[in-house]
């Protein structure tokens, strides 16, 4: 280990030790006993002022913990045949780094069969246990720190939600795996989605985290490859004041495209995004077209903000129905659910529930439920295979496992996971989940808004049912006009300078001089020489026959006529005295598509003299 890595770990260790403060909130945890224990880091509550908010996250927080409980019970059905079981100790990190590190250190200190009964000065009194791996935490920001700390103790970690590409560094995060793909794939899918819908002038807001920053960088890279212009970009954070958010939205209001819409990409988690959306609601801003990352897609916005999100399109992990989870959720009561935060959750979101009758009507199809299940399955399948090979026909935790089971050994078995417990999951390159996304749109159905699948992005292939709608900053310039840049991604169409024409639409101003010299432009001096039937050049003077001279003069007259045309071709051609009747009739039918201009350019006489 090099000095820099030692300093990094030492810094993390001191940071964790400095945060070991007992509090009423942190004394709440879930413990399910077992022969092998998984540590769980879940964001049950939202964060506030670098601590825990009183509000529970009804989606990612409480539901992902419940999904872990269900998956654990399913795995133990198989492990029971071997006489062993998999347990869980789960903590609430509140989307914060310090609690995540504190609990990770606790897991590290319990990763051996210890005789200690009391830990951390009576903060928690727990029986001895063997923590073999960690699931979580929720965000990439937390995961970066946790993965660095757990690597010091060689403890495998699987996240079902951390997607930032910063975690792709296999050398730095050797003991980290995830059942979700890297955001590099998601960014590529978002850009393809923009291109498929014709949204080539966009703004992007991204959060100040590894998830947001790396996602933004990937989107910017792929957008350049697809000729999509990012006219406005802004990094946001939870620390932004209402005034700062208002200033950002004021800037966005001036970024309408040619159709009067504001196309915005939101690459951030829901807690950050909802602050922005709530402010949009308060400011009564309309005309937004949202393209959102998986931090928002599939999640219902807070009550009252549905109209603001109407029509939003985004990517989320392609998922399937988890029947065991749905059955579990809809049959739980406060008396039967081991989740210690369950009663608090019901009180906040289902206040009319009673202990004996409390069917949860909440969204059981949120993203990441399957990916968290796959994380539990991966650990369970690895233990099952290790036991089969080490203990042979012996049941229980045999001596061989006690002596030989290490983080490195478990890591090897995790990488070999393939379709655990009859699922279709596998680690791509032994590290992350396969890139399979569902493209969904938030639309009204009756009296409710729902996320509806409108396409898929699998591997790098996009399948989309959405209707294409062009959305650039400015309208396309017709032939005879050039783009004059007014601001980033935007332009105005101005007529070509006198003596020049274009043979294509959307010609940029910067190429005009080049076009004059080598395409369809005619200079005054050349016009004079041509009409006299001669042309001076670096080569020998060429004599033309009277027929060729007449043909070339006619070509130039046609070029001069076309040069003065505006969008109202029929009006100009009927009133312009310099264009002969023959030319008017010849040009009139084809000029809209610039066919005559192309013909002039291809004329050998014109090419010789121009």
Image (tube, helix red, strand yellow):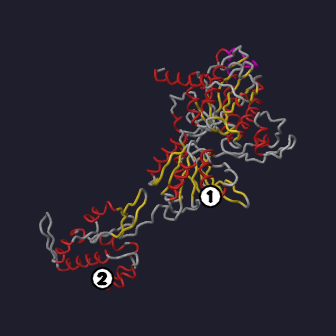
Q: Residues within 10 Å of mark 2 (few under 14, many from 20)?
A: some
Q: Can you give x and y, in whole percent of width and height, for residue 590 in the image?
A: 39, 76
| Residue 189 appears in the figure | no
Q: Can you give x and y, in whole percent of width and height, for residue 583 in the image?
A: 32, 82
Provide the secondary structure element on which disc 2 rests: loop
Residue matched to label 2: 579
Q: Quadrant of residue 448?
A: bottom right
Residue positioned 48% across, 57% down in the render: 200
Quarter of the image where the C terminus is located: bottom left
Q: Residues within 10 Å of mark 1 (few under 14, many from 20)?
A: some
Residue matched to label 1: 311
Task: Please state the extent of the stretch shown in magenta in the rendering.
Answer: 388-402
Q: Does residue 129 lie above or below 484 as drawn? A: above
Upstream in the sequence, badge 2 or badge 1?
1
Q: Quadrant of residue 588?
A: bottom left
| Distance from the alpha carbon under mark 2 to that under mark 1 | 51 Å
Disc ID at residue 493: none
- Residue 401 magenta: yes
Toward the right, the furthest residue is 356
Provide the secondary structure element on which disc 1 rests: loop
| Residue 284 appears in the figure | yes
- Residue 348 magenta: no
Q: Can you give x and y, in whole percent of width and height, for residue 328 in the image?
A: 79, 40
Q: Does residue 580 lie above or below 270 as drawn? A: below
Camera-side residue of 440 and 587? 440
């Amino acid at each position: 280990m090099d000095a820099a890595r030692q300093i990094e770990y030492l810094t993390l260790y001191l940071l964790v030790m400095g945060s070991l403060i007992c509090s009423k909130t942190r004394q709440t945890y879930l413990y399910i006993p077992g022969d092998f224990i998984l540590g769980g880091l879940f964001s049950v509550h939202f964060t506030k002022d670098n601590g825990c908010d009183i509000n529970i996250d009804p989606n990612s927080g409480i539901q992902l913990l419940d999904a872990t409980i269900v998956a654990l019970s399913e795995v133990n059905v198989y492990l029971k045949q071997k006489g062993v079981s998999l347990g869980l100790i789960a903590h609430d990190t509140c989307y914060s780094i310090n609690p995540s590190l504190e609990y990770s250190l606790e897991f590290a200190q319990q990763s051996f069969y210890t005789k200690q009964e009391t830990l951390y000065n009576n903060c928690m009194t727990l029986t001895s246990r063997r923590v073999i791996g960690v699931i979580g935490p929720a965000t990439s920001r937390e995961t970066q720190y946790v993965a660095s700390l757990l690597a010091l103790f060689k403890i495998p970690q699987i996240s079902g939600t951390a997607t930032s590409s910063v975690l792709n560094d296999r050398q730095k995060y050797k003991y980290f795996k995830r059942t979700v793909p890297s955001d590099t794939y998601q960014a590529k899918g978002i850009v393809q989605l923009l291109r498929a819908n014709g949204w080539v002038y966009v703004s992007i807001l991204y959060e100040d985290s590894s998830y947001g920053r790396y996602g933004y960088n990937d989107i910017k890279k792929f957008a350049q490859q697809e000729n999509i212009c990012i006219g406005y970009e802004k990094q946001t954070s939870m620390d932004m004041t209402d005034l700062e958010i208002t200033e950002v939205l004021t800037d966005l209001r001036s970024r309408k495209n040619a159709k009067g819409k504001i196309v915005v990409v939101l690459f951030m988690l829901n807690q950050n995004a909802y602050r922005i959306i709530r402010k949009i609601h308060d400011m009564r801003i309309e005309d937004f077209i949202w393209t959102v990352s998986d931090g928002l897609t599939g999640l219902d916005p807070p009550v009252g903000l549905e109209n603001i999100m109407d029509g939003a399109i985004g990517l989320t992990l392609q998922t399937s129905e988890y029947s065991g989870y749905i059955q579990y959720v809809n049959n739980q009561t406060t008396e039967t659910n081991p989740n210690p935060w369950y009663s608090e959750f019901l009180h906040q979101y289902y206040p009319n529930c009673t202990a004996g009758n409390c069917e949860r009507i909440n969204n059981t199809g949120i993203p990441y439920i399957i990916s968290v299940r796959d994380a539990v399955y991966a650990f369970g399948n690895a233990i099952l295979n290790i036991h089969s090979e080490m203990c042979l026909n012996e049941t229980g935790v045999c001596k061989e496992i006690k002596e030989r089971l290490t983080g490195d050994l478990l890591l090897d078995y995790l990488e070999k996971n393939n379709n655990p417990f009859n699922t279709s999951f596998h680690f791509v390159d032994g590290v992350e989940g396969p890139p399979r996304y569902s493209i969904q749109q938030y639309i009204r159905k009756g009296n409710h808004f729902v996320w509806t699948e409108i396409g898929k992005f699998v591997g790098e292939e996009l399948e989309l049912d959405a209707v294409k709608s062009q959305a650039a900053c400015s309208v396309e310039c017709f032939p005879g006009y050039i783009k004059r840049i007014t601001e980033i991604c935007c332009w105005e169409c101005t007529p070509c300078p006198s003596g020049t024409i274009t043979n294509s639409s959307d010609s940029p101003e910067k190429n005009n001089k080049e076009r004059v010299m080598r395409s369809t432009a005619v200079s005054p001096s050349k016009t004079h020489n041509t009409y006299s039937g001669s042309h001076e050049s670096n080569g020998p003077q060429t004599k033309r026959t009277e027929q060729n001279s007449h043909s070339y003069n006619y070509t130039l007259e046609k070029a001069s006529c076309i040069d003065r045309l505006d969008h109202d071709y029929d009006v100009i051609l009927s009133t312009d005295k310099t264009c002969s009747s023959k030319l008017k009739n010849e040009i009139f039918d084809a000029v809209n598509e610039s066919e005559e201009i192309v013909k002039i350019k291809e004329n050998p006489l014109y090419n010789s003299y121009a």
